[in-house]
Image (spheres, helix red, strand yellow):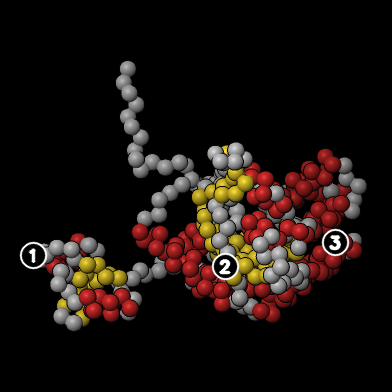
Amino acid sequence: MTDDPPPNPALLPAGFVDLLPSDAEAEAAGMESLMQVFAAHGYSRVKPPLLEFEDTLLSGSGAAVAEQAFRLMDPDTRRMMALRPDITPQIARIAATRLADAPRPLRLSYTGLCVQASGGARESDRQISQAGIELIGPDTPEADAEVVALGAEALAVLGVPGVSFDLTMPPLAPALIAEVGFTPAERQALMRALDRKDAAAVAKLAGGLAPVLTELLHAAGPAERALSVLGGLVLPEPVRALSERLAATFAAIKARVPDIRLTIDPVEFRGLHYHTGVCVTVYARGQHEELGRGGRYVSNNDEPACGLTLRPEALLRAAPARAGRARVFLPVGSDPALGRRLRSEGYATVDGLAPVADSVAEARRLECDMIVAGDGVVALN
C-alpha cells in the first residue's frame, strides 16, 4: 500500500482561477474604466461586504439567488452567513437602510467579487467580478433608458465591438397566460414550452391563446419588427400596458443613443423571475456568453429601481487587448529624478537592484521594452 501523492499546490477548486499579471492588470484597468463612466454620470460608488448574515443577504430580491449562495456559520454569533452570489441585493439593502434619507433618484455604482455555488455565464466560473449601476426611485421609461445608455457608453469605452442590447418584458407572457383559466399544471407546462422557445409545444398547449403566443415567439429579433407585431395584436388591457411600456422604453433609449443596436424578445423571462418591467441582456458579435444583464425590479421597502450588472471577465474576452505600460529598465546608479519623470509620463520603471555585466541582457530578462541611456530611454530590439 502506498500513500497518495500530495496535491499539486497550484490546484484550485473547480471554477476558481488565478489571474496572472497581464490578465489581472487588464481586468483592474477595465473595471476602473467602467467605474469612471458611471461616476461621470453622477453615480456614487458604494462597497458592500463580501459576506453577510444569511437572513439579510438572501431576503427580498436576494431570495432569487439563494440557491447560488455558499453558507457558513459565524463563529462569534453562531448565526448563518452567506457569501454574496450577486451584489444587487446588497445595493437594495443599502438604499433602504443607510441611504434611506438620501434624495431620489438615488444613483449608485459598485464593483467587486461574487462567489456562486455553480457556474455563472460559463460553467467554469464560480468566482466572478461584477461592475454595475442601480437607479433607485423613478419608475419611468427615461430611467430605464439611462441605465441602458450608460451600459452602451461603458462598452464603447472598452472598445467592445458589435454590441447589442436585447430588451425583454418578463411579466408580459405570464400576464397574458393569467388571463386564461389554465390549471397550475397546464400553466407550468406552457411556461416551460415558452422558455424552450418550442413553438410546436406552445401551439399544442396554449389552446385559444396559441395564435398570439406563436406570433410573439416569432417576433423575437430586431426591435422595430417586434414592436410592430406587438402593436398589431389584440391584448388584454394589463398586457397592453406592459407592451406600451416596452415601446416607450425603446423610444427613450433611441432618443439617447440613436445608433444603438436593440433587439426585443417579447416572451423571454429565463433568469428574470424577480423583475417587474423592462429588462436587458448585453451581447457582442462572435461571443457566446452574456456580457451583462439587468432591468427593472422592486427594491427594498417596495421602492422602484432599475439597474445593469456587467461581467468584466466576459467584457475583456470580447474587447480588444489593451497594451500594458511600456517597461523601462533603470540600471543601478540611474538618476531617481529620471525614474520619477518616466513614471509621470506613464511608463513602468523596473529598478536594477545590483550591478550587472550586461544591462541590456538584464533588461530583456526582466521583460522590459526600453532601457535608460543618458537622460532618456532607448527601445530594445
Nearer-the-camera pick, 181 or 347: 347
Looking at the image, tell me whether mark 3 or mark 2 is earlier in sequence order: 2
Which residue corresponds to the image point at 67% horizontal and 57% vertical from the top-left?
93
Which residue is farthest top?
1
| In this rendering, the label closer to the viewer, 3 or 2 | 2
Q: In the rendered structure, which amino acid carries the disc numbered 1?
A: Ala
Q: Residues at badges 1 and 2 in contact (C-beta under 8 Å)?
A: no
Looking at the image, tell me whether mark 1 or mark 2 is earlier in sequence order: 2
Name the spot of residue 161 as percent of width and height, x first.
Answer: 51, 70
Which residue corresponds to the image point at 51% horizontal and 61% vertical from the top-left?
312
- The image quadrant that residue 231 belongs to is bottom right
Q: Is residue 281 left or right of residue 337?
A: right
Name the spot of residue 278 as percent of width and height, x first.
Answer: 73, 64
Q: Which mark is residue 114?
A: none
Name the spot of residue 241 as percent of width and height, x first.
Answer: 85, 66
Looking at the image, tell me whether mark 1 or mark 3 is earlier in sequence order: 3
Residue 155 visible in rendering: no
Q: Residues at badges 3 and 2 in contact (C-beta under 8 Å)?
A: no
Label 1: which residue?
357
Q: CA distance from mark 1 to mark 2?
A: 50 Å
Q: Residues at badges 1 and 3 in contact (C-beta under 8 Å)?
A: no
- The image quadrant that residue 254 belongs to is bottom right
Q: In the rendered structure, which amino acid carries the disc numbered 2?
A: Arg
Name the spot of residue 263 as percent of width and height, x first.
Answer: 67, 66
Q: Is residue 330 left or right of residue 129?
A: left
- The image quadrant that residue 169 belongs to is bottom right
Label 3: which residue?
239
Which residue corresponds to the image point at 44% horizontal and 62% vertical from the top-left?
27
Density class for disc 2 (Cα within 10 Å; few <14, some 14-19, many ≥20) is: some
Label 2: which residue?
45
Which residue is farthest front?
76
